[in-house]
Structures are given as structure tokens and as C-alpha cells.
Image (spheres, helix red, strand yellow):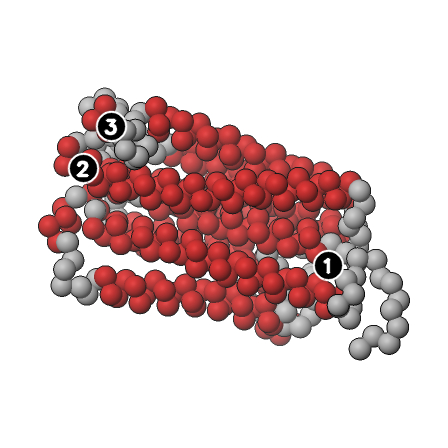
């Protein structure tokens, strides 16, 4: 979560290196976790878990490495908007594809 | 309005202050990254749709990729993101030596990624798994070859694999060029405590490219990892 109480402060924390190391450790642990989980058969949950871990990793990179946690409100709005626009594109297109009568069901086996 | 033009090192004439200039640069970069999100988003969309059509083809195709090399590259990129963040930090501190050091390490890690990627591509082409006409002969790849009924679905997967990782690698090449430019600029003493926007903005780009890989690695390499190796179904 972005800390909006600091929205227009350009002040980065006194010592951001400890945050950077923290994110680095998180990314490494999450990478190991995503591999371990992927080797277990969880059925359709495999994809969901993989994506959840990837989203957590991406969020950490955006907030800390890309300084969005300490950026201006305007920058934070653009970041949120980019995610929102991506979701519009994904959800509208997929809702179209997945509700088409002409879905190539015969190919689904492969 | 600035009444008189006191020259500030690194301040372009159409900005009032260094702060305003920096903010404009950051906002501009984030808008560019937004277009990049949509750009890669289209490919992730194609991935989702084709994976739904050809679930078995994607599981089998995922098995054909080298998880060790893909995983190594994931670690390489994570470390490079850390060193890039450190480079940005030292550019803010105005510590030239450490800035150049971390930029150089980041560049070397980026190049390591590309070298590993090259070997991955080369082995795919050697195994006749590059999906282009004349180069795709999956029946000859591996011990028994790709099963006949999966050859077309696997080909779709491989197109998506080469398209997505190729576009990502292209971004890495551009990123390496940017890093080299930054190193040369830093050596000439272009960056100071007050002026380091190029380093910060390039950092955003580098981290973005890392984020793309964070999604590519599990979706492409690990999708079939829970199945016994080689069979794919």
C-alpha cells in the first residue's frame, strides 16, 4: 500500500538501503517459493499461486525500488492508472473471448 | 515566474526549479512505462487466450524450456535491480565512484542475462524448436520428439515464448545501451547531488524490465514444472 500521508514529500527515508536489501531478500525468497510451488500439482491453483507471487514481487519492486512509496501523488495516480488500464484491457478482451459461441472447443484437448 | 535567470547547473531554461524539472521527468517516464505496460499486456493477453485454447500444448511447451537457465536469469535480474537501486541512491548522494561502480555491475549483470538468453535460444534452434517455417521440426527434438497431436499447439507456445522473451531481451539490450551511456556521463562528471534525473529515470526503466521478467519466468518456464519431466501429459 502506498503511504499517502507522505504524498508530496520528496523526502526519501534516511537510509533506504535497508529497504532495498529487504526487497531483495523478499524477491529471492519469493522466486524460490514460486519454483517450489510450481513443482507441486495443485491443479488449476498452480497458475493462481504463480500469479499471486508475481504480483507481490512486482508490487515490492514498484513501491521500493521504483520509489513510488515516496513519490508525488501524481506519480502514484499514474501507476495505479496503468494497472487499472491493463485490467480493463484484460477483462474486456477475455470476457469477449470466453463468451463467444465460436470458441474452438475441439482444440481444448491439446 | 523566475524574474532573472540565475544559472543552475543542469537546469533547462523552460523549468522554474530543479524540483519541477525532476518531477516532470519522473511523470514523463511513468507515462512512457504506462504505454509499456499496455504493450506487454497485449502479449500476456495472447498468452492467456492461447493457453486456454491449448492447455496441453502449453504444459508440454513449458517443459521444453530450461528451468535452470531461466531461474539463473531470474536471480541475475533481481541482483541487477538491487545494484541499480544502489546506483540511484549513490547518484542522489553525489558519490561518483560508487555510482559508476554500481552502474558497471548492473551493466555486467544485464550482459550476463543476454549471454544466458543467447545460449537458450541457440539450443532451441539447434533442437529444431524455433517455430518458423523451415526451422520447426519438433518430431526430431529430444528423445522421442514432440507427440504429433501436440506439434501445432507447442508451436503456438513457442511463438509466444520467442515473442515475449525476444521483446524482453530487446528491452535488455536497450537498457544495456542506456547503462553504458550513464557510465560515460558519470565519468565526465555530469551528475551531481542536485542533478541525477537521467540515473533515476533509467532506474525506473531497468526495474520495469525486471518486473516483466518476474511474470514471464513462472508463466513460461514453470507452467509445466509439476508434471514428470519430458512427458508433458
Q: Position of residue B41 (x, y in %)?
A: 40, 56
State the residue position of label 3.
B137
Foreground of the two, B136 or A27: B136
**Which quadrant does the N terminus of chain B fall into?**
bottom right
**SS at badge 1:** loop
Q: Which label is found at residue B112?
A: none
Could you say which quadrant of the image residue A62 lies in? bottom right
Foreground of the two, A40 or B219: B219
- In the displayed image of the protein, which residue is found farthest to the front? B133
Within 10 Å of disc 3 (Cα), the crowding (few <14, some 14-19, many 20+) is some
The reply to whether discs 2 and 3 touch (Cβ–Cβ < 8 Å) is: no
Foreground of the two, B229 or B221: B221
- Are labels 1 and 2 on one chain? no
Foreground of the two, B161 or B106: B161
Label 1 vs label 3: CA separation? 58 Å
Report whether B78 appears left or right of B44: right
Residue B83 can be seen, yes or no: no
State the residue position of label 2.
B150
The reply to whether discs 1 and 2 touch (Cβ–Cβ < 8 Å) is: no
**SS at badge 2:** helix
Amino acid at each position: 500500500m502506498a503511504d499517502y500521508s507522505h504524498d508530496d514529500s520528496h523526502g526519501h527515508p534516511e537510509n533506504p538501503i535497508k529497504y532495498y536489501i529487504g526487497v531483495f531478500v523478499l524477491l529471492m525468497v519469493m522466486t524460490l517459493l514460486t519454483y517450489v510451488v510450481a513443482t507441486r500439482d495443485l491443479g488449476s491453483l498452480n497458475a493462481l499461486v504463480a500469479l499471486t507471487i508475481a504480483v507481490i514481487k512486482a508490487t515490492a519492486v514498484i513501491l521500493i525500488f521504483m520509489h513510488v512509496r515516496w513519490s508525488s501523488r501524481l506519480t502514484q495516480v499514474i501507476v495505479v492508472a496503468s494497472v487499472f488500464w491493463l485490467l480493463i484491457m484484460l477483462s474486456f478482451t477475455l470476457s469477449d473471448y470466453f463468451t463467444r459461441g465460436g470458441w474452438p472447443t475441439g482444440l481444448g484437448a491439446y | 515566474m523566475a524574474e532573472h535567470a540565475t544559472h543552475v547547473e543542469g537546469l533547462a531554461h523552460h523549468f522554474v526549479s530543479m524540483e519541477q524539472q525532476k518531477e516532470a521527468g519522473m511523470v514523463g517516464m511513468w507515462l512512457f512505462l504506462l504505454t509499456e505496460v499496455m504493450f506487454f499486456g497485449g502479449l500476456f493477453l495472447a498468452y492467456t487466450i492461447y493457453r486456454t485454447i491449448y492447455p496441453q500444448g502449453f504444459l508440454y511447451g513449458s517443459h521444453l524450456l530450461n528451468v535452470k537457465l531461466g531461474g539463473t536469469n531470474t536471480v541475475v535480474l533481481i541482483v541487477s535491480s538491487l545494484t541499480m537501486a544502489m546506483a540511484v541512491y549513490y547518484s542522489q548522494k553525489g558519490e561518483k565512484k560508487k555510482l559508476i561502480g554500481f552502474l558497471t555491475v548492473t551493466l555486467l549483470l544485464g550482459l550476463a542475462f543476454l549471454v544466458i538468453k543467447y545460449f537458450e535460444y541457440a539450443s532451441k534452434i539447434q533442437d529444431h524448436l524455433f517455430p518458423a517455417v523451415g526451422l520447426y521440426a519438433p518430431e526430431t527434438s529430444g528423445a522421442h520428439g514432440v507427440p504429433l497431436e501436440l506439434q501445432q499447439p507447442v508451436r503456438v507456445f513457442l511463438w509466444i515464448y520467442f515473442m515475449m522473451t525476444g521483446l524482453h531481451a530487446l528491452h535488455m539490450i536497450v537498457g544495456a545501451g542506456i547503462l553504458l551511456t550513464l557510465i560515460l556521463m558519470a565519468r565526465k562528471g555530469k551528475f551531481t547531488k542536485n542533478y541525477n534525473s537521467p540515473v533515476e529515470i533509467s532506474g525506473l526503466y531497468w526495474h520495469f524490465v525486471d518486473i516483466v521478467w518476474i511474470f514471464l519466468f513462472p508463466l513460461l518456464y514453470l507452467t509445466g514444472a509439476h508434471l514428470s519431466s519430458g512427458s508433458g501429459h
